[in-house]
Image (spheres, rainbow, N blue to C red):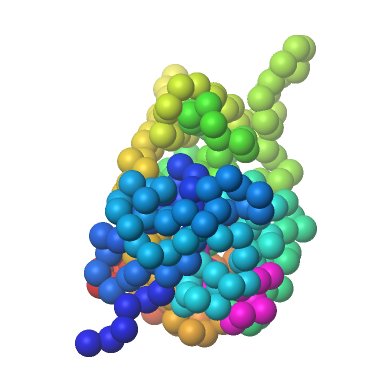
Amino acid sequence: MSDPVRVAIAGAAGRMGKMLIETVGQEPGAVVTAAIERPGFEGLGRDAGEIAGVGTLGVPLGDDVAAAAEAADVLIDFTIADATEQNIEACRAAGKRMIIGTTGLSPEQDARLVAATADIAVVKAHNFSVGVNVTFKLLEMAASIFGDGVDIEITEAHHRHKVDAPSGTAIGMGEAIAGALGRDLREVAVFGREGHTGERDGATIGFHSLRAGDIVGEHTAMFAGPGGTCADHARRPLALQLRAGCRARCALGRRAGVRALRHAGCAGPEGAVLRSGGWVSGRAAHGCRQVCGWRIEAKR
């Protein structure tokens, strides 16, 4: 029987981090061996399992990213952009793999991630829900069918604690649509509208963000044309997204490179390309299915 995969959790005392600790504990073949938080956090030294409400794990909460990387095979990072940037460098130095669900990375931070993947393997996704990744594929199909004859608007709603907007999932939806239409999302995205905006440019893709209460995450892509409107909705249960994120570790080989979630099981880093600040499916991926998330689910 093979040894369990040793997992480090970044932001372990946060909402996502505590759910990740619980989720990893439910995964056969995986064990939490390190948990980190920001320097000065008042809970440093406490048992990470007790903080997460899953019982004692014997893993003290620390703030040394380098030490956490050394104690693990893979680091799971669903934190904030600046923290993720530091974690990437620590994992690169230690030669350890990463699963990144952090959204809101700047182009410069994405570039540092690309540089790091020369040495380590990374799975990065706007959203780790298999269903949402299927939605990305369906949006590509819808955009190809509707073509340039419709106006496209994307709305998303999240809980009041989310710090970036629009959400990574909304950006992923926009990238899927823009890619299918041969557009560069960086050039056609419009984020909110106010005042006298003039007539709508048909080539643009609009984004609108709502923040309220404890909404987990709701997304809608609207294709509106003369005489009719079609909308595709995606609502993700957070626990399912985190379970998919943990299972993505099964598809992380020791070969360096970066994979989008849909191509995490592919042979090499050619399975993903960077477009408009997010990782999306690569057309040159070899031997993968249309939506590789299914492969991740099948790997146990």
Count of numbered labels shown in the rendering: 0
Residue drawn at x 67%, y 30% is 191
**Is 99 colored magenta in this rendering?**
yes
Residue 193 against residue 299 in the figure, above or below:
above
Give left or right: position of 198 versus 12.
right
Confirm whether residue 85 shows in the render.
yes
Q: Residue at x 50, y 45 (%)?
A: 14
Q: Is residue 174 visible?
A: no
Q: Measured from the top left, where is residue 231 in percent x and y?
A: 41, 30
Residue 213 lies, in percent from the top left, at 46, 22
Q: Residue furthest front?
A: 45
Q: Nearer the viewer, residue 285 or 64?
A: 64
The x, y position of residue 122, in whole percent, is: 54, 70
| Residue 45 placement (x, y as % from top left) | 52, 57
Task: Please state if 177 lies on the left or on the right of 134 as rendered.
Answer: right
Residue sitting farthest toward the bottom: 1
Report the magenta residues as a range: 89-100
Task: Give the camera-side residue of 208 and 27.
Answer: 27
Quarter the C terminus occupies:
bottom left
Asked if residue 74 lies in the magenta stretch, the reply is no
Q: Residue at x 50, y 21 (%)?
A: 212
Residue 286 vertical placement versus 195 (above, below): below
Name the residue located 59 percent from the left edge and 82 percent from the top edge.
Answer: 95
Q: Nearer the viewer, residue 21 or 145?
A: 21
What is the quadrant of residue 118 in the picture? bottom right
For the N terminus, give its image quadrant: bottom left
